[in-house]
Amino acid sequence: MAKAIMLQGTGSDVGKTVLVAGLCRIAANRGLKVRPFKPQNMSNNAAVSDDGGEIGRAQWLQAMAARVPSSVHMNPVLLKPQSDVGSQIILQGRVFGQAKGRDYQRLKPQLLDAVLESFRITGEGADLVIVEGAGSPAEINLRAGDIANMGFATRAKVPVVLVGDIDRGGVIASLVGSHAILPEEDRAMIAGYIINKFRGDVSLFGDGITAIEEFTGWPCFGVVPWLKSAARLPAEDSVVLERLARRGTGALKVAVPVLSRIANFDDLDPLAAEDDVELVFVRPGERIPADAALVVIPGSKSTIGDLGDFRAQGWDGDIVRHHRRGGRVIGICGGYQMLGRVVHDPDGIEGDVRAAPGLGLLDVETVMAPEKTVRNASAWSTEYDASLAGYEIHLGETRGADCARAPVTIDGRPDGALSADGKVMGTYLHGLFSSDTYRAGLLSSFGLSGERTNYAASVDAALDEVAAELEAVLDKDWLDGVMAGG
């Protein structure tokens, strides 16, 4: 079995995903065969792995950092929160079922064997596996049956590095408190800790490191500064939504309603990276800006539920007025379904509501169906004569008169719909904006330069920058020991 190390956090959103990605890139740059692994993830930001199943977008990014194909075994349990039916459970890339919180707690012990199997498969032929935990191991109320943190680490015998986020404050208390509250078996798994997201003069934290070691006996493996290059990496999960804000000051204002069950919102990252774009995330209680030239309705884990919330916010009126003013609209996946005349759910897949009126900007109807479409795709934009590469993750089929003007072909078949006036477009293809040629064509259609930027190269360069910064600040002896492989 390959050597392994696990990063767990003192809480959610402490930066584990980026640190694991950076360590994977360091190992890959040193010539090691490295693989990422996360036993359990909760996110509606999913990706289609290279072997054809659903995994967390974060593990897809970490596989890119490791320069290896992504696999369903890198994230064997993916929880996708949806409406009143709880979370959908994806097990080893396929839909396993759905459960509400208390029911899932009883289900977890049954999933551990699959998690350990995937860990073994991930490690086959590898020198090193870098594992990411979820939440915090100090949530001792959830320790029984745990598969995400110490429950996994103790069964798989993987040493743990605890990550604390100093930017949110209380990092000494969170680390010392974790030491105090963990049972002895779990505490013994922790080899040391990393302080993350430090701003300012690191020498000022010397007394803090001394205090933590006095209370815990744990060594510090490094103080990591705020990694600015991490902002160029794809958004990892729904926690990031709390920090989404207006980005850029470009000439093209693009408004994005933040749906209650928004999914795969990293679709927007390539637009946000463009100097000519100002991306405005419209939150509940806010209006869609009247001066926006383009509104993008992103994916949704619950189309009917989000349609109800969309109307409750008054965004349905905003978007109709936007269209009447000559503004343009793009809907992706669930956003595409919302743009039609009606969404039918005869089997109650999303809940008790069997049908809901759409926004009526496209002459199409959607019927939900139990079989989920999950696949990577080679595609083509008929609007901008541009090659596209993306993926599909959706339930349901959409048909209607506007589908005769399909804006995209996916693997040679028509996809999506375009309104008669050419102002409203929808597609099931995720990754639309990642195409440099498509983005250039879109910007040109708004009278902008349309100069191409290489988005994929920018992400890869950001991973190298994160790796370089980590190499500079992490304890060299510890890092070299980790990278020594099996």
Image (cartoon, rainbow, N blue to C red):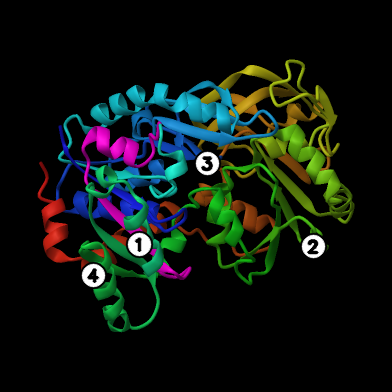
Q: CA distance from mark 1 to mark 3?
A: 25 Å
Q: Residue at x 48, y 24 (%)?
A: 107
Which label sits on residue 214?
4
Crowding at dot 4, Cα within 10 Å, few <14 / some 14-19 / many 20+, comes out as few
Mark 3 or mark 4: name the one nearer the start of the chain: 3
Let me know if residue 48 appears in the view. Answer: yes
* CB within 8 Å, label 3 to label 4: no
Q: Tell me where residue 295 appears, x and y as whole percent.
A: 73, 52
Mark 1 or mark 4: name the one nearer the start of the chain: 1
Mark 1 or mark 2: name the one nearer the start of the chain: 1
* Residue nearest the observer in this picture, 383 or 395: 395
Q: Tell me where residue 278 appears, x and y as whole percent.
A: 65, 65
- The residue pinned by badge 1 equals 175
Mark 1 or mark 3: name the one nearer the start of the chain: 3
Q: Amino acid at mark 2?
A: Pro
Mark 4 or mark 2: name the one nearer the start of the chain: 4
* CB within 8 Å, label 3 to label 2: no
* CB within 8 Å, label 1 to label 4: no
Q: Amino acid at mark 3?
A: Ser
Q: Residue at x 85, y 44 (%)?
A: 311
Which label sits on residue 289?
2
